[in-house]
Image (cartoon, rainbow, N blue to C red):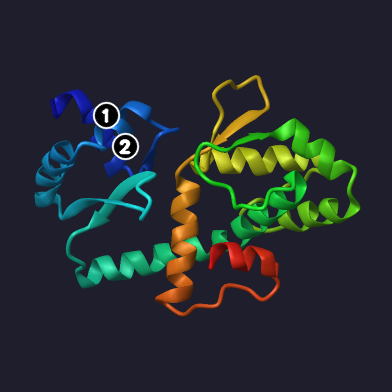
């Protein structure tokens, strides 16, 4: 049975995030406690363990015991995560305002890049927000039109595992559970690490992530 899901282990060990969108079969496999225990038993000699967000919408690997070299490595990864965190929060804010949603994006939400581009094109305030977004290091785009800028943003999100594009020739994208992980990480940073992320993130977004 473990060999049947060797690809799942490979994804996890490569730093992958398993959710209903990215790997439906693997995600269902991990809903079984006995299967999770079997994977954890296999991972123990590697100093790794299965972990999930509080809602259980996404699974990933964590270290069992943190040695000093690992702490140094994680510290660097944490800094890189912070670099992408602010642009991601701004993107969530832009998407909410564009679509008129009250709630933050979560796994299985569907985004249509063409519809978003049309709405942003007709709203000067949203165009300014998108322009500021694509000038960040995480999303950097050289395009001057809304459609090209948004394509770069979506391509980055897809390559980093935040979006899944079922059909490459269509504009529909499905939000993955990695977004849920990002939001939980944001809460952890604020509540446990007491790191204030940025002053100009809109109050409504602050409330959603509080």
Q: Is residue 114 above or below residue 43?
A: above
- Residue 20, x across and y down, in percent: 40, 34
What label sits on residue 11 in the rendered view?
2
Tell me the quarter of the picture where residue 165 sits: top right
- Residue 201 visible here: no
Would you call the spot at circle 1 few (<14 residues within 10 Å), some (14-19), or many (20 or more)? few
Q: CA distance from mark 1 to mark 2?
A: 6 Å
- Identify the residue at image location x=35%, y=55%: 54
Tell me the quarter of the picture where residue 24 sits: top left
On screen, residue 57 versus residue 208, left or right, reads left
- Residue 195, x across and y down, in percent: 50, 78
Question: Farthest residue in the front direction?
Answer: 102
- Residue 121 visible here: yes
On screen, residue 79 versus residue 27, left or right, reads right
- Identify the residue at image location x=66%, y=44%: 153
Would you call the spot at circle 2 few (<14 residues within 10 Å), some (14-19), or many (20 or more)? some
Q: Is residue 97 above or below residue 16?
A: below
Question: Farthest residue in the bottom direction?
Answer: 194
On screen, residue 93 versus residue 120, left or right, reads left
- Identify the residue at image location x=21%, y=67%: 66
Q: Nearer the viewer, residue 140 or 59?
A: 59
- Identify the residue at image location x=64%, y=63%: 205
Q: Is the residue under label 2 in contact with that under label 1 (CB below 8 Å)?
A: yes
Q: Split into 4 quadrants, where in the image is the N terminus?
A: top left
Q: Of helix, strand and loop, which one carries label 2? A: helix
- Residue 35, x across and y down, in percent: 16, 36
Circle 1 residue: 7
Q: Of helix, strand and loop, which one carries label 1? A: helix
Q: Nearer the viewer, residue 71 or 164?
A: 164
- Residue 186, x across and y down, in percent: 49, 64
On screen, residue 81 versus residue 50, left or right, reads right
């Amino acid at each position: 049975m473990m060999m049947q899901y060797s690809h799942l282990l490979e994804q996890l060990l490569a730093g992958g995030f398993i959710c209903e969108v990215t790997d439906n079969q693997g995600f269902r496999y991990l809903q079984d406690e006995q299967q999770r225990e079997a994977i954890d038993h296999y991972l123990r000699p590697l100093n790794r363990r299965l972990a999930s967000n509080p809602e259980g919408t996404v699974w990933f690997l964590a270290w069992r015991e943190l040695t000093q070299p690992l702490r140094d490595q994680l510290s660097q990864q944490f800094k890189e995560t912070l670099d992408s965190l602010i642009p991601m929060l701004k993107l969530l804010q832009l998407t909410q305002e564009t679509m008129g949603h009250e709630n933050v994006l979560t796994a299985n939400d569907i985004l249509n890049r063409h519809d978003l581009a049309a709405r942003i094109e007709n709203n000067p305030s949203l165009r300014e927000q998108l322009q500021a977004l694509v000038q960040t290091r995480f999303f950097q785009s050289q395009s001057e039109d809304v459609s090209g800028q948004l394509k770069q943003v979506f391509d980055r999100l897809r390559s980093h595992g935040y979006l899944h594009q079922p059909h490459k020739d269509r504009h529909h994208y499905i939000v993955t559970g990695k977004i849920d992980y990002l939001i939980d990480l944001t809460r952890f940073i604020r509540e446990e690490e007491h790191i204030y992320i940025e002053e100009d993130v809109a109050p409504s977004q602050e409330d959603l992530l509080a």
